Image (spheres, rainbow, N blue to C red):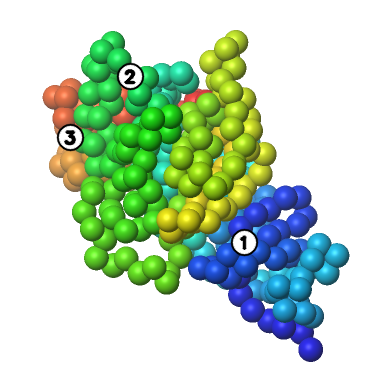
Amino acid sequence: MAIKGQATVVKHTGSHYMLAQLPQWNLFPAVLRGKIRLKGSTATNPVAVGDIVTFEADVPAENLSLENPAVITAVEQRKNYIIRRSTNLSRQSHIIAANLDRAFLVITLDFPQVKLPFLDRLLVTCEVYNVPPVIVLNKCDLYGPEHQDMLEAFREIYTGAGYPIVEVSAHTGDGVDRLRDIVSGKILPDGSVNENYDPSKPVVSLFSGVSGVGKSSLIKALDPSLDPRVGEISDVHLQGKHTTTFYEMYSLVSGGFIVDTPGLRGFGLVDLKKEEIALYFPEMLKVAEDCRFAPCTHTHEPGCAVKEAVEAGEISYDRYSSYLGMLDEEGKYR
């Protein structure tokens, strides 16, 4: 008699998947039954890490093997997900991860230098698909006096837009304890106690960023028992060498689950119309209702409250510039 159950996809390599019945970390292999297509989805991967799936097996999960895997028969409705296109001109999209409680966007101000339009595309995607983002500023031990103006300007831009920033150093451990408690769900990004914390409910977070920001090193700092592959920075291009080659979830000893992703080099927006983009810039949305015309593209219209806020320094020109780039279908940010 077939055994039926539900589990979470924690790893995807080729045609094989690893599942676990979270919060238990009881890994077992699975394969897809035929072609599974999600209603309304154009993504290249019908099943993503973080998906909750229905499976069938002829033996208990602990007795399954690669030679005798479970069979995934259905994908449950997602509460949210993160999706990307490799470039703005590509029509193919790929779901990075699903059913996320938070997305931790790991960046560095220098080496590699943060590209704000790229970060803004990640933030817009989090807003569109209802995944609360946290900006993680890594390698803070490397920021000397010459970086302080740049650091303060960065804080002003993104805290002003309403995004929490956690400053850490995977190398020295500074800020890692705070980040660990946020990942586990024990505290909120602002440092306050999470009154709704329930250790019996799995907290799943995405860790993402460009190559070379120290994402794998940071995961290892959060839980030294883990061993995600750590790469070196390319001196030639000042970009990280790709080390993570597939999407994978890790269970942290301190609580919580992390989905690690390959270092991203391009991030195109998916399923977003031009007239909708401004809705996902929180600082623009706050003042847009005061625009003289509606709808307003915030580009050329007279009496535009957003443009006035930019000119007054109330909205970051860098963020506004990112918005204009997203309006340009030919624009590419990598």
Tag 3–tag 2 contact (CB < 8 Å): no
Query: Which quarter of the figure has residue 31?
Result: bottom right
Identify the mark nearer the N-term, 1 or 3. 1
Q: Which mark is residue 151?
A: none
Coordinates of residue 114 in the picture (x, y in percent):
42, 24
Coordinates of residue 35 in the picture (x, y in percent):
76, 64
Q: CA distance from mark 3 to mark 2?
A: 36 Å
The residue carrying pointer 3 sits among few (fewer than 14), some (14 to 19) or many (20 or more) residues within 10 Å by Cα, namely many
The residue carrying pointer 1 sits among few (fewer than 14), some (14 to 19) or many (20 or more) residues within 10 Å by Cα, namely many
Residue at image coords 34%, 51% = 182
Looking at the picture, tell me which residue is in the foreground, 27 or 203.
Answer: 27
Residue at image coords 43%, 48% = 103
- Identify the image quadrant of the N terminus: bottom right
Residue denoted by label 3 = 305
Q: Amino acid at mark 1?
A: Val
Coordinates of residue 261 in the picture (x, y in percent):
57, 42
Q: Secondary structure at mark 3?
A: helix
Residue at image coords 25%, 30% = 155
Mark 1 or 3, closer to the camera: 1
Mark 3 or 2, closer to the camera: 2
How many numbered discs, if any? 3
Q: CA distance from mark 1 to mark 3?
A: 45 Å
Q: Secondary structure at mark 2?
A: loop
Q: Is residue 299 above or below residue 128?
A: above
Tag 1–tag 3 contact (CB < 8 Å): no
Q: Secondary structure at mark 1?
A: strand
Q: Which mark is residue 9?
A: 1
Q: Amino acid at mark 3?
A: Ala
Look at the image and tell me whether residue 216 can be seen: yes
Residue denoted by label 2 = 143
**Does residue 21 appear left or right of residue 125 in this picture?**
right
